[in-house]
Image: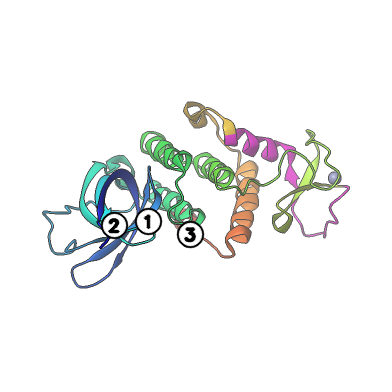
Amino acid sequence: MAVREQSKTTGFVLRTLNYSESDLIVTFYSHDFGKLKGIAKGAKRSKKRFANVFEPFSLTNIIFTRKSRDMLAFIESCDIIDHFPAIRQDMEKTLIASYFIDLTDHFSPEGKKNEKIFELLRDFLLLLGKEKASDTLVRFFEMRLLKLAGFDPVLEHCIVCKTPVTNGNAYYFHAQEGGIKCGACAKVPRYEQPISAGTVRTLLLGKKMDIDKIKLVALTQSLAIESRCILTSFITHVLGREVKSLKVMEQVRKYCA
Ligand SMILES: [Zn+2]
């Protein structure tokens, strides 16, 4: 008989699913095991054993057992490390945090460890708690996650003629081909919106810029619109569907603006 091995890790709660009247299936993004799914027996009944720990994007200490790596983990205990109260008391920040974890969930296969993705989530949630909610935070998170997940869009040069991005030129983003084309290479229909070299450069900067400096970057309206346009179309193309929490976030923003 296989022996259940006990493991410990820290992880962000990505989502929960009601399993029965009293049990929950919880998906975490963990430091040591990547995306991890486990069952919390009695979580809905025993408030003492799992006191409000399974809220989305909470950071927790998890102790679990499982027979093998591809089996559902049995969550023995789970305690809060950070509940991110500064995010939770602000609706816009809560929506952004929900989008961060949703995107992490979509881009992470189960059981594949990636410490850098864990750190990205931790750094951006801490930043979101401290700083103002902004488009910069959302776009730079997307850029970094895409890179770590291996879906970096090509923005350094035209994907056809390879000419590096030059200030003052207009570019066109092609989600299906995963990058930008210059005006000469793109067969541009009249309705297509060009993207400025400034937008392209800002997104490239966001990929590697020091985390403490991100708060200093404010996107102008046209830059914000162009960046959103590029990244949303690309993410939708890569995933083959829209990310629901992004739609909710955009709708609420429009409503509150
Ligand atoms: Zn070109």
Give the mark nearest the N terminus, 1 or 3.
1
Residue at the front extreme? 1
Is residue 189 shown in magenta? yes
Quadrant in which the N terminus appears: bottom left
Report crowding for label 2: few under 14, some 14 to 19, many 20 or more residues within 10 A (C-alpha): some
Report crowding for label 3: few under 14, some 14 to 19, many 20 or more residues within 10 A (C-alpha): few
- Residue drawn where x is 61% and y is 58% of the image: 238
Report crowding for label 1: few under 14, some 14 to 19, many 20 or more residues within 10 A (C-alpha): few
Give the mark nearest the N terminus, 3 or 2.
2
**Circles 2 and 1: CB distance less than 8 Å?**
yes
Q: In this view, does 27 lie to the left or right of 24?
A: right
Q: Horizontal and vertical percent for residue 135?
A: 52, 43
What type is the residue that disc 3 sits on? Gln
Q: Which mark is residue 251?
A: 3
Q: Horizontal and vertical percent for residue 173?
A: 73, 51
Is residue 126 shown in magenta? no
Q: Residue 69 carries which label?
A: 1
Q: Horizontal and vertical percent for residue 104?
A: 46, 51
Q: In which quarter of the image is residue 44?
A: bottom left
Q: Give the Cα distance between marks 1 and 3.
A: 39 Å
Q: Quadrant of residue 235?
A: bottom right
What type is the residue that disc 1 sits on? Arg
Q: Nearer the viewer, mark 3 or mark 2?
A: 2
Q: Please, what secondary structure does the residue beneath circle 2 have? A: strand
Query: Which range of residues does the magenta coloring cover?
Result: 184-207
User: Which quarter of the frame holds ligand 1?
Assistant: top right
**Circles 3 and 2: CB distance less than 8 Å?**
no
Q: Please, what secondary structure does the residue beneath circle 1 have? A: loop
Comparing 56 with 148, the one in front is 148
Q: Mark 2 points at which residue?
A: 66
Q: Is mark 1 within 8 Å of ligand 1?
A: no
Is residue 93 at least partly visible in the picture? yes
